[in-house]
Image (tube, grey):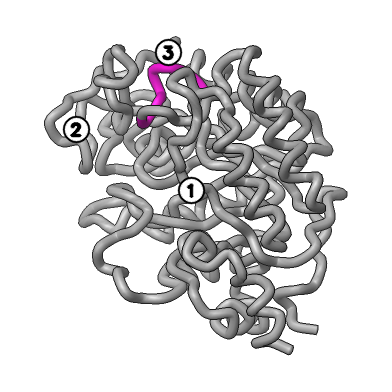
């Protein structure tokens, strides 16, 4: 049997295969971020497509951290009912369900939130250059850590199998890690060690909130892909620390200005070298995404030991029969 279709058990949770639907924003929620029938139908169809794990699109943990209109929310207890329906719809097909939680930081849209944009420093975001964010205070940072923990607990209460912390694609945790957006000179900035602090605090708070046995993923932006930005060396310094705190799966991506860097357009499995680098320094499973189209490419990455899980996103959107076709191709 191809490795792509072998089970994988992590933290007591067994995935039926190694194919993952990574988080892809749909903006199919209500204007208040609540689950709709349209959203349920969307994820139900992918669970039926035969993937082993679905990571639901990023949900904002506070209104100030909202990235776009009709983004999914997990900021209050009233979101739990809809999230429960979503988790049940995915799990009914034998698929593992994980929800991603996020704060957009200086990538938030103040036209949507109606609130001041905040970030690690008063430095414009590379993809939001017209807005200078307000630098977060230490007390405000502590509040964000608490909000991540509360959001993770709601995900658990909703019946998901796990939760993923979003630390990539230029959102808040990525902003704190990156020397491009973090110019602080306190405990949260300056050296690499200090820039890693918030990611570690959030991970520790989330692990404490959900307990030791709940599946915890971390989407790690392994490189900013900008001059003077975060590099794979920085990410390799952080990943083992997150593992010690309790991360069960590392979901590797990159690009502070977005998840589809122009430099990689037309290339396949472009984040694989970054994922392979992280796999060198952690013992927990590593998931890679990034333009994976061919089943043979996915299988080669697994056979070569570069990764443990394969994220197939936009190709699955184009071809919902991808998993079934891959079985035939790799037979």
Q: Main secondary structure of the magenta part?
A: loop
Query: Disc 1 and disc 2: Cα gap in Å?
Result: 25 Å
**Residue drawn 57% across the image and 29% down it:** 36
The image quarter containing residue 53 is: bottom right
Marking on residue 140: 3
Is 176 on the left or on the right of 46, as rendered?
Answer: left
Vertical placement of residue 302 versus 260, above or below: below
Q: Is residue 178 magenta?
A: no
Would you name the residue on which mark 2 appears? 124
User: Within 10 angstroms of label 1, few (less than 14), some, or many (20 or more) residues?
Assistant: few
Residue furthest out toward the left = 130
Would you name the residue on which mark 1 appears? 24
Query: Disc 3 and disc 2: Cα gap in Å?
Result: 19 Å
Q: Position of residue 78 (x, y in %)?
A: 63, 13
**Residue drawn 40% across the image and 43% down it:** 192
Marking on residue 99: none
Residue 283 seen in the figure: no
* Camera-side mark, 1 or 3: 1
Is 237 on the left or on the right of 184, as rendered?
Answer: right
Tag 3's secondary structure?
helix
In the picture, the quarter occupied by the C terminus is: bottom right
**Residue drawn 32% across the image and 48% down it:** 256
In the picture, the quarter occupied by the N terminus is: bottom right
Q: Earlier in the sequence, mark 1 or mark 2?
A: 1
Provide the residue span drawn in magenta: 61-68
Tag 1's secondary structure?
loop
Tag 2's secondary structure?
loop
Vertical placement of residue 16 versus 113, above or below: below
Q: Is residue 65 magenta?
A: yes
Q: Position of residue 5 (x, y in %)?
A: 75, 73
| Front in this rendered view, residue 160 or 32 | 32
């Amino acid at each position: 049997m191809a490795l792509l279709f072998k089970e994988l058990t992590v933290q007591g949770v067994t995935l039926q295969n190694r194919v993952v639907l990574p988080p892809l924003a749909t903006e199919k929620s209500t204007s208040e971020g609540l689950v709709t029938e349209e959203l349920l139908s969307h994820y139900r169809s992918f669970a039926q497509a035969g993937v082993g794990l679905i990571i639901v699109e990023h949900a904002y943990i506070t209104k100030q951290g909202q990235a776009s209109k009709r983004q999914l929310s997990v900021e209050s207890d009233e979101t739990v009912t809809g999230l429960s329906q979503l988790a049940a719809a995915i799990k009914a097909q034998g698929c593992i369900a994980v929800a991603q939680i996020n704060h957009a930081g200086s990538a938030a849209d103040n036209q949507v939130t109606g609130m001041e944009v905040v970030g690690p420093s008063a430095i414009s975001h590379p993809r939001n250059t017209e807005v200078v964010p307000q630098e977060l205070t230490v007390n405000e940072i502590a509040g964000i850590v608490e909000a991540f923990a509360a959001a993770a607990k709601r995900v658990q209460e909703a019946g998901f199998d796990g939760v993923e912390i979003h630390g990539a694609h230029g959102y808040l945790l990525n902003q704190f890690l990156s020397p491009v957006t973090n110019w602080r000179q306190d405990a949260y900035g300056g050296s690499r060690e200090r820039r890693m602090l918030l990611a570690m605090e959030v991970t520790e708070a989330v692990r404490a909130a959900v307990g030791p046995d709940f599946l915890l993923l971390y989407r790690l932006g392994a490189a900013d892909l900008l001059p003077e930005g975060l590099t794979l060396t920085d990410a390799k310094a952080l990943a083992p620390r997150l593992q010690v705190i309790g991360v069960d799966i590392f979901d590797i991506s990159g690009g502070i200005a977005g998840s589809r860097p122009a430099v990689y357009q037309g290339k396949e499995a472009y984040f694989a070298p970054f994922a392979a680098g992280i796999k060198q320094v952690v013992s927990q499973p590593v998931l890679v995404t990034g333009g994976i189209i061919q089943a043979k490419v996915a299988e080669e990455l697994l056979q070569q030991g570069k990764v443990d899980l394969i994220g197939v996103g936009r190709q699955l959107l184009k071809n919902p029969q991808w998993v079934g076709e891959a079985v035939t191709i790799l037979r």
